Amino acid sequence: MTAEQFKLNGYTLVTGAVSLELRDFVTQYALFDEMQNQHTRGDDQVPAAHSKYADPAMEALLVHLLPLMQDSTGLALIPTYSYYRVYRTGDILEQHQDRNSCEISATVCFNFDYDPLEYTWPIYMAGNAVVQQPGDMVVYRGCDLVHWRDRFNSPQTAWQVQGFFHYVDANGPYAEECRFDGRQSIGEPKTVSKPNKSYIIYT
């Protein structure tokens, strides 16, 4: 059903995509990483938010989620890169479309620190509000759909940890250009020389 929804709408919600144990581990990992790197500048989209490209834990999840992503889209996919952010009160994700390496993308809500009965912070896909619970994943066509989040008007101390996992259609126009986001391998930082060892166990 999710693959049909993806084909029809360009996005779909996959509930419970990440297990309770894994989402809680990643949430605590991300919050500790924010604490240890609290003076690191965020990205251009959300400058105040702690964020990281190709974090090793997220790169492992990029590989781990590949079978589910393929089932959810009905497509053969090639991983490109991972990313994550720790959003806090006042953050806003402006309306945008993604670059080619994000042709087929997923945003995973690992967890948040507010009462979902009193407040929700949806992601908008082509104008449609999609509310995620911890462990839920929204799969979407990142280059095609305009998506955004309004200002995070949560209680002052609240946070939300989101992971982003990007892929391209193995039979699409970006397959070779964007494979591994121009890196030699998944797991590498953005600029690195070609590795002389194997580090990936997926096939």
Image: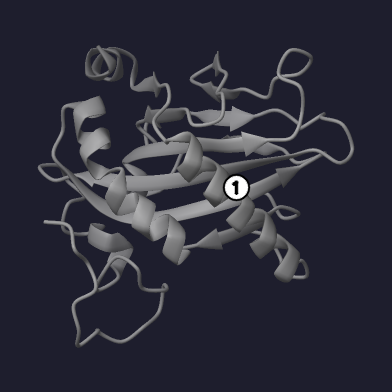
Quadrant position of the N terminus in the picture = top left
* Residue 17 percent across, percent down from the top left: 39, 31
The amino acid type, in three-letter code, at marker 1 is Thr
Instruction: Determine whether 180 is above or below 116 in the image.
Output: below
Please indicate whether residue 118 sits to the left or right of residue 4 in the image: right
**Quarter occupied by residue 82:** bottom left
Tag 1 secondary structure: helix
Q: Residue at x 44, y 60 (%)?
A: 57
Residue 40 in sight in this render = no
Q: Furthest residue to the right?
A: 156
Q: Check the image and report above or below for 25 versus 59.
A: above
Left or right: residue 11 versus residue 176 is right
Seen in the picture, residue 9 relative to 152 is either above or below; the reply is above
Pick the residue in front: 22 or 62. 22
Image point (71%, 66%), residue name? 41
Q: Is residue 10 visible?
A: yes
Residue at image position (87%, 31%) is 155
Label 1: few (<14), some (14–19) or many (≥20) C-alpha neighbours in 10 Å:
many
| Above or below, 202 relative to 131 | below
Q: Which residue is mark 1?
A: 27
Q: Position of residue 169 (x, y in %)?
A: 19, 41
The quadrant of the picture occupied by the C terminus is bottom left
The residue shown at (34%, 51%) is 62
